[in-house]
Amino acid sequence: MSKLTVTYIGGPTALLEYAGLRIVTDPTFDAPQLYPDEGGVPLTKTAGPALSRADVGTVDLVLLSHHEHQDNLDYEGLELLATGVLTISTMKAGSDLFGGGVVGLDSWESREVGAVTVTAVPALHGPPGSEARLGPVTGFVLQAEGEPTIYVSGDNASLPLVQQIADRFPDISIAVLFAGAARISAVNGPLTLTSADAAEAARIVGATHVVGLHTEGWEHFTETRADLEAAFAGTGLLVETPPGVAVEVGPSPVE
């Protein structure tokens, strides 16, 4: 079985090299700044990306969990989408970002991209009832012959939904989890997985390797990379992903 190569860029953004594709998750390449969010909740970015958009080079696919908040799609991220790169996201993103390469999928719908089958899977951006304020989000499952099956959570905070995904995809071996327990004052509860919930999500899907994203670079992330590492202490699941460094993730010869 082949491996996934991950280059962590910052926040929710990483470059995944998988089955011949160069895939970027939730593109955020802006410098640190304050965003006056349209919903009335400002967001503050505190650290820039480890790699610029130009440094990343060719991108074959963007996996966009949602498009309505700058901590998942910022100005430079929009510039990337404007190049016409195929972008898979929510149905609402497909409607709102028409005219480019954005394709919206409903949960459990799939799209073939090269050798990869990309399936949109359900996600909830916060506690039950928060969708009306925060909008729809999606996660993804990636499958390809001879490759590990990968779950990319997107901005999901719901463990029951993770269980649904595990039931449909019992062979997930790598989980790319958006953690950080993001919070805003307008919503009573974390908008993404807490560190403890990320560890439970990994257990539910049966992951043998976990890539942790979405734990640093923004003021509204309330749990850090250190918190995530503590939650996974002793499991051997969490992969070290130094910013800007390509890391191979996947089965070793003894597995």
Image: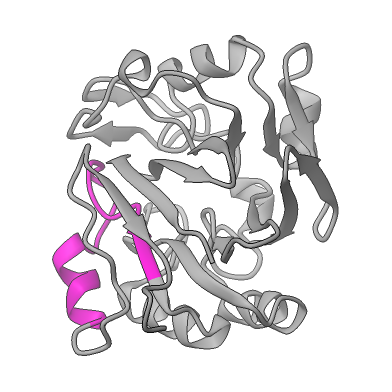
Where does the image place residue 153, in percent across and percent down from the top left? Answer: 54, 60
Q: Residue at x 21, y 28 (%)?
A: 48
Left or right for 242, reference 85: left
Q: Quadrant of residue 64?
A: top right
Q: Quadrant of residue 102?
A: top right
Taking the spot 48% from the left edge, 68% from the top edge, the residue there is 174
Q: Which residues are magenta?
A: 210-232
Q: Is residue 149 visible?
A: yes
- The residue lying furthest to the front in this view is 253
Where does the image place residue 232, in percent across and percent down from the top left? 26, 81
- The quadrant the C terminus occupies is bottom left
Which is more toward the observer, 59 or 191? 59
- Tell whether 242 sits left or right of 179: left
Task: Please indicate, yes or no, whether residue 10 appears anywhere in the rendered image.
Answer: no
| Residue 215 screen position, x and y as percent | 27, 55
Question: To which quarter of the image does residue 223 belong?
Answer: bottom left
User: Can residue 214 be found in the magenta stretch?
Assistant: yes
| Farthest-out residue, left | 226
